Image (tube, grey):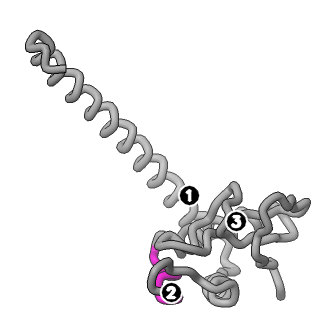
Amino acid sequence: MQTFIIKTHQPGKSYPQPHFFVLNKGLNAGKSLKKPCPNCFVIITKSVHSCNHLFHLTLMLQIGQFFKAYLKGSVIPFITINDCAMVIKKAYCEDAQLLNKSAKMIENLTKKEEEYQFLLHKLAQLKRAYIQSIFKNLELM
């Protein structure tokens, strides 16, 4: 049963069906994207549910580095459309409960990661401001 169609994205083209994009070049090849970029595939599905299902599945495959074995090229690595489709089809799970549970966990972990990155950024700003306040009277700048 064909649940999705994968094509090379053409910049400027819009898709009426539910869809998402997959980066196809670089070390992040296989990464799920909500918005297109010049080097990506588009995955088109029949329903929003299956689109969301495949988006999270593809995201988990990229985080788990399952696309890495299929990268080709020495200067700029890339994944072919056939290899990308094959990896997704092999991993496609009919058990929606398992994927939903896993997707929720990945979503929660991603939110925590973003919170920690925000805190690290704020701590770096605080450290810089503190150091600048120590030396502000020295006219170093």
Q: Main secondary structure of the magenta part?
A: loop
Q: Residue furthest top?
A: 137
Judge from the rendering whether residue 121 lies leftward or rightward of residue 39; answer left or right. left
**Disc 1 from disc 2: Cα separation:** 34 Å
SS at mark 2 in the image? loop
Residues 54 and 24: in front is 24
**Is 47 one of the magenta-colored residues?**
no
Q: Amino acid at mark 2?
A: Gly
Q: Quadrant of the N terminus?
A: bottom right
Q: Is residue 1 left or right of residue 112?
A: right
Please state if 141 lies on the left or on the right of 56 as rendered. Answer: left
Q: Nearer the viewer, mark 1 or mark 3?
A: 3
CA–CA distance in space, label 2 to label 3: 21 Å
| 89 left or right, relative to 104 | right
Q: Residue at x 81, y 70 (%)?
A: 44
- The first of marks 1 and 3 along the sequence is 3
**What percent of the width, then of the height, locates residue 90?**
63, 89
Residue named by callout 1: 104
Residue carrying label 3: 21
Q: Earlier in the sequence, mark 2 or mark 3?
A: 3
Tag nearer the camera, 2 or 3: 2
Judge whether 141 appears above or below 93 on screen: above
Q: Quadrant of residue 91?
A: bottom right
Task: Indicate the quadrant where residue 17 lies.
Answer: bottom right
- Which numbered circle lies on residue 73? 2
What span is colored magenta in the figure?
64-71
Q: Is 117 drawn above or below residue 79 in the view shown?
A: above
- Amino acid residing under circle 3: Phe
Which of the pair 127/73 is nearer the observer?
Answer: 73
Q: CA distance from mark 1 to mark 3?
A: 20 Å
